[in-house]
Image (spheres, coloured by chain):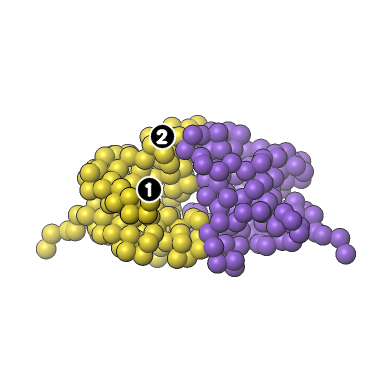
Chain colours: A yellow, B purple
Amino acid sequence: MTKPDPMAEALKQAEAAAALGEVPVGAVLVEMASGEILARAHNLVERDSDPTAHAEILAIRRAAADQGAPRLEGTALYVTLEPCAMCAAAISFARIGRLVFGAYDPKGGGVDHGARFFEQPTCHHRPEVIGGVQEQECGALLQAFFKARR
Amino acid sequence: MTKPDPMAEALKQAEAAAALGEVPVGAVLVEMASGEILARAHNLVERDSDPTAHAEILAIRRAAADQGAPRLEGTALYVTLEPCAMCAAAISFARIGRLVFGAYDPKGGGVDHGARFFEQPTCHHRPEVIGGVQEQECGALLQAFFKARR
């Protein structure tokens, strides 16, 4: 049996968010050694009345709770959109080893834009970062969502 | 009856965190018009196995859940330490009107240091910020905590 493609799984999560009327961003946390998926999540800000309920935060919180420790060494996080500064800092605090994201986010991103959190002297753990993976599919979901809401 | 002083309440929260072996940071969210305290919280990263369980995030999540909406307009957040980039972004997303903090945090802060989140073009809501309030008391708690752990 082949391992599921993490970014394809993250895209499924983003689609599930859109179906709920949430901003369509999905995230999947993977154990790097085995490829096993440890957590899947999507935005739930509106449903949960929680401004911090971004896909990345929810995936990190679930996986950390499951393993009973606040640090997630040896994991990779796949996200359909460039994380914001909140999520970038959470990724760093969780000691995640690799961040793979889809679309770039010039308006709200905190990795390649704005805060550029991982480049700050106040950042004490920097994951390997790979951006622009399946960028078109990831961005198209967001564009369709915001176009339909205008 | 006089209203409780929010920073004094935040300091009590920080002391409660220290008693649990958590980094002693406390936060209190106040309704600006009435002075009513909407949420009190302190760090619970270790106890909850949650790298995002900073005092500010927990106070925001509780108040937003209580009111059934992800935005907390008309509120002020009192924190004993300069918020990190994660918490600064969460404060912005929650549309908090005023941030009052105690000690400055050159190593990990995200307001006056590092990411300086509120000064970024990717920040779409900037609270009024007042830093250095009861700075000595707030900082002393942290210094004593880290000194005892060395």
Instruction: Give the number of the mark in front: 2 or 1.
Output: 2
Q: Position of residue A74 (x, y in %)?
A: 33, 50
Whether labels 2 and 1 belong to a single chain: the reply is yes
Picture layout, residue A49 above or below residue B128: below
Residue A61 lies left or right of residue B30; in this view the side is left
* Residue name at image x 59 percent, y 41 percent: B126
The mark found on residue A17 in the picture is none
* Residue name at image x 74 percent, y 56 percent: B33
Q: Position of residue B103 (x, y in %)?
A: 69, 41
Quarter of the image where the N terminus of chain A is located = bottom left
Provide the secondary structure element on which disc 2 rests.
loop
Mark 2–mark 1 distance (CA, rounded to whole Å)? 20 Å
Residue matched to label 1: A96
Residue matched to label 2: A113
* Residue name at image x 67 percent, y 40 percent: B129
Q: Position of residue B42 (x, y in %)?
A: 63, 57
Which amino acid is tagged 2? His
* Mark positioned earlier in the residue sequence (2 or 1): 1
